[in-house]
């Protein structure tokens, strides 16, 4: 089961890094991406939605999971849906 947690962390890490790279596009800051991340952070912090705890990896600092979750949800519902599909076990077997 620890291997699954490692895989989930790797997927989250890639998703977060790819999102953060979008903050700076074509030599300038992306106001839309900054705004989306700000709204995502507002939502996850005010609701205490800790993405690490949700996937079974509670951290010693829940704020970290809230910040990471805010970055993830800033990408929108389609991205989050695709991310969930990646980390859920295949139920067709």
Image (spheres, rainbow, N blue to C red):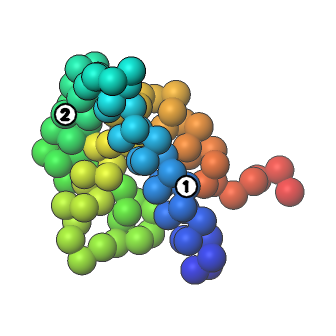
Provide residue 84's location: percent of width, then percent of height: 56, 46
Marks 1 and 2, how far apart at CA: 22 Å
Looking at this view, name the residue that lies furthest to the right: 93
Asked where in the image residue 58 lies, by quadrant, the reply is bottom left
Q: Which element type, helix, strand or loop, lies under badge 1?
A: helix
| Res. 79 in view | yes
Question: Residue 93 or 77: which is nearer the viewer?
Answer: 77
Q: Position of residue 41 (x, y in %)?
A: 21, 41
Q: Quadrant of the N terminus?
A: bottom right
Dot 2 crowding, Cα within 10 Å, few <14, some 14–19, many 20+: some
Instruction: Verify CB contact (< 8 Å) between mark 1 and mark 2.
Output: no
Residue at (20%, 53%) from the top-left corner?
48
The image shows residue 26, relative to residue 23, as above or below, that is above
User: Which residue bears the numbered disc 1?
Assistant: 11
**As rendered, which of 58 and 23 lies closer to the eye?**
23
Residue hosting label 2: 38
Give the residue displayed 86% in from the left and 57% down from the top.
93
The numbered mark, 1 or 2, whose residue comes first in the sequence reads 1
Q: Secondary structure at mark 2?
A: helix
Looking at the picture, does residue 14 appear above or below residue 41? below
């Amino acid at each position: 089961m620890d291997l699954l947690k490692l895989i989930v962390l790797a997927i989250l890490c890639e998703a977060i890094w790819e999102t953060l790279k979008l903050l700076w596009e074509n030599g300038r800051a992306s106001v839309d991406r900054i705004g989306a991340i700000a709204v995502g952070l507002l939502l996850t912090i005010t609701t205490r939605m800790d993405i690490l705890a949700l996937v079974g990896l509670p951290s010693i600092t829940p704020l970290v999971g809230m910040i990471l979750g805010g970055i993830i949800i800033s990408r929108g519902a389609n991205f989050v849906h695709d991310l969930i599909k990646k980390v859920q076990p295949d139920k067709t077997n």
